[in-house]
Image (tube, grey):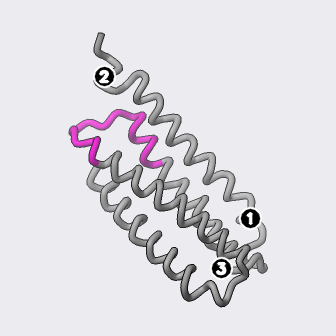
Amino acid sequence: MPRLWLILAAGLGGSAVLMGAWAAHALKAQLSAHYVEIIHTAVNYQMWHAIALLALAFSCRESSVPNSLKVTGWAWCLGTLLFSGSLYVIGLSQGGWLGQWPWPLITPLGGLSYVVGWVSLLVYGLKDSPTAKSP
């Protein structure tokens, strides 16, 4: 699992850089500032969660990963797919027919998935981590 998260973090981080550069340079002339900002928001959330996933991968070097950390990692991956992915579709389509239903409904589900990941990390810190079990 940690190796997979490391690979996913690298892919998400690298693609966030590419998308951010593409939006800042090539798309800036083609899209309105509003849609460039939507893409920038997607890139920002994607990069922060790629970095968090990278940290998670390095903190899970044990052979058995607690369930709370498994939920954390997968929730962040799902959040990136749903939240950032839907914002990319909305931004690149400039709100056209492709950016309409169901994408605006999917974006909050991705945000919720991000939050589930962070709450699951909190649970790990409060009850599952080795330091939480010490006197």
Q: Earlier in the sequence, mark 2 or mark 3?
A: 3
Q: Is residue 66 magenta?
A: yes
Q: Identify the amino acid type marked 2.
A: Thr
Residue 41: quadrant of the picture: bottom right
Q: Residue at x 49, y 50 (%)?
A: 76
Label 1 element class? loop
Q: Identify the amino acid type marked 1.
A: Pro
Mark 2 closeness class: few <14, some 14–19, many ≥20 residues within 10 Å: few
Q: How far apart are labels 2 and 3 at the CA level? A: 45 Å
Identify the mark at residue 102; answer none if there is no mark.
1
Question: Residue tagged by mark 3?
Answer: 92
Q: Read off the magenta span.
A: 58-74
Q: Identify the amino acid type marked 3.
A: Leu
Q: With 32 as the anchor, is 11 left or right in this view? A: left
Q: Position of residue 66 (x, y in %)?
A: 34, 33
Label total for image? 3
Label 3 element class? helix
Q: Position of residue 48 (x, y in %)?
A: 47, 55
* Mark in the foreground, 2 or 1: 2
Identify the mark at residue 131; answer none if there is no mark.
2
Q: Earlier in the sequence, mark 1 or mark 3?
A: 3
